[in-house]
Amino acid sequence: MGRIVLENVTKSFGDAQVIPPLDLAIEDGEFAVFVGPSGCGKSTLLRLIAGLEETTSGKIQIDGEDATQVPPSKRGLAMVFQSYALYPHMTVRKNIAFPLRMAKMDQAEIDKKVEGAAKILNLVDYLEQKPGQLSGGQRQRVAIGRAIVREPAAFLFDEPLSNLDAALRVGMRLEISELHNRLNTTMIYVTHDQVEAMTMADKIVVLRAGNIEQVGSPLDLYHTPRNVFVAGFIGSPKMNIIDGPEAEKLGATSIGFRPEHTDVSTTEGKWKGRVGVAEHLGSDTFIHVHDTGLADMITVRIAGDIAVTHGDDIYLTPQMDKLHKFGADGLRMA
Amino acid sequence: MAIVATSTKFSIYGRPVLAWIVGLIFFFPIFWLVLTSFKTDADAVKPEFLIFFTPTLDNYLNMTENYDYWRFATNSVITSVFATVFALAVGIPCAYAMAFNPSRATKDVLMWMLSTKMLPAAAVLYPMTFLTKSLGLFDTHFMVIVVLMLINLPIVVWMLFTYFKEIPKDIIEAGQMDGVNTWGEVKEILIPLAWGGIASTALLCFIFCWNEAYWTVRLTTTEAATLSKLIEGNRAPEGLFFGRLSAVSAAAVGPIIVLGWFCQKQLVQGLTFGAVK
């Protein structure tokens, strides 16, 4: 069980308030992702939940009990660090067994659990090696193994994949998602990568400067971003945001349309521009369009291929039913 | 090209030769000390017996029979061992706190600790003498241990702090998440990881304690007197007993040289403050 509730939580370092009063509930079994640009307070928020940072004010509840003053060792949470933070002087077996040994579990039980975790994570052949002999992906698995053996109330992941190369990252992403499906335990995952957030989360929490900008399912955030920031942050390539006369015509301060929600033609359309760079991915083509008079650059995404090159004229028409309108305060207009 | 050629030649021939010269210069006093310790007091000052003389063990026999060498040596071992153990017992938690939970004052505290080493010992000689006498601690093992521990504590904390700083904080935090308390962090994670650093710190502290002379000579008479005191006691103003003095000195530095020989690697690491990983 692991329902985590934050009530009015704040955190200051000296005079600098990094987390203004914040409320958040993460349900039992949920995969929640904290996402935001670097310095937005997402890691601090995770460390507050872990107990590695003390809250300045407010309350943190884990499973209905007030854990605000409980030290990290007693909160029943497990954490996977960006640097893996394995114990370099212990073998893989001892690393994974460490939390169990600290909990004074008997040796036979420990051995059984370690073997079980090693099997799930493909570490059986490496149990007697030291972390220094392992690759990055294997180290990450050991860190996860150390977390799962204790059957924690919740897992906390602090940018666990950022030290891995791109191919491995995609693989580990899947493995963590599968692990969540299998264990059905609450997971809180911090990342700056919105692709990780979109693919893994049940619930995404978008943060900026310590404030929660929006909480919702990946598709909620994609289809109905609450404000300009979320609109620009979620989705890849980024949503195009346009200010000025074109937006005013529609009674908004800014309008946004996603690259994939734009019709493209070489002969006719609403706005004319010039092709800058065309990125041909095979399945899709991204075209960066300049000289539209609307914004410095507008990005569009077309399924399949289109025969355009640098300097060609191009016409863009946004799909009106998928257009986002934002008011002067940056908030979404109904 | 010329530079490369010269540096290569130097590293093949020059460096070993230079190393040997420096080594011999440093070794010479020890060699001379040991040589003189096998001469009679009379021979020791005669130029004709500078190198060639009839060796004798009299000085050493005399030392153990008449000067109670073993009592002084025992005192040296007791005071140095306990002072080192206590310095580590205080220094490890102190360095741990400063390395992993630094506050705004940590840097100043470290500087302040080091600054106590800048105080000339003579400046507190009288207060210390009166204090130890009025507390009834003059010439006791306890007092010598406390004094040796205190004068070495700054360097112990500094060295440990430097070693602990090299341990990523994440690992300590991972320990907290894995359910260990503060003592567990120190015992299960910190000490095993910093073992090399702690060992070299201990070794250096022990050597400093063993060699300390200013306080051990002045704050002891017989009961807690260490080997430094024995050497001091054999220093005749007329300079007549070089043989005897050399034997005592050789017997005082002997154990520490042997210890240093066996722990060379640790010592180098300790003296370079963890620069060698």
Image (cartoon, coloured by chain):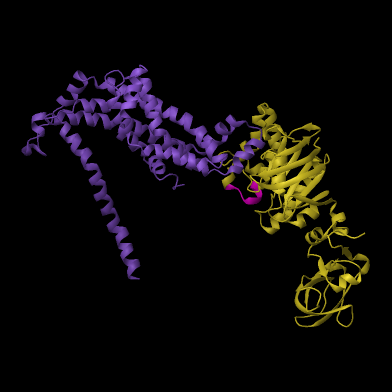
Whether residue A31 is visible here, answered yes or no, is: yes
Relative to A194, B114 lies left or right? left
Start and end of the magenta stretch? A133-139
Q: Position of residue B31 (x, y in %)?
A: 20, 39
The C terminus of chain A, quarter of image:
bottom right
Q: Which quadrant of the structure image shows residue A170?
A: bottom right
Q: How many numbered marks does the figure carry?
A: 0
Inspect the magenta stretch and tell me whether residue B226 lies in it. no
Relative to B98, A262 lies left or right? right
Q: Is the magenta stretch mostly helix, strand or loop?
A: helix
| Chain whose colour in the figure is yellow | A
Q: Where is residue A118 in the image (x, y as percent from the top left)?
A: 69, 40
Is B211 rendered above or below residue A295? Answer: above
Viewer-side residue, B99 vs A18: A18
| Chain whose colour in the figure is purple | B
Whether residue A121 is visible here, answered yes or no, is: no
Is A234 rendered above or below residue B276? Answer: below
Relative to A204, B233 lies left or right? left
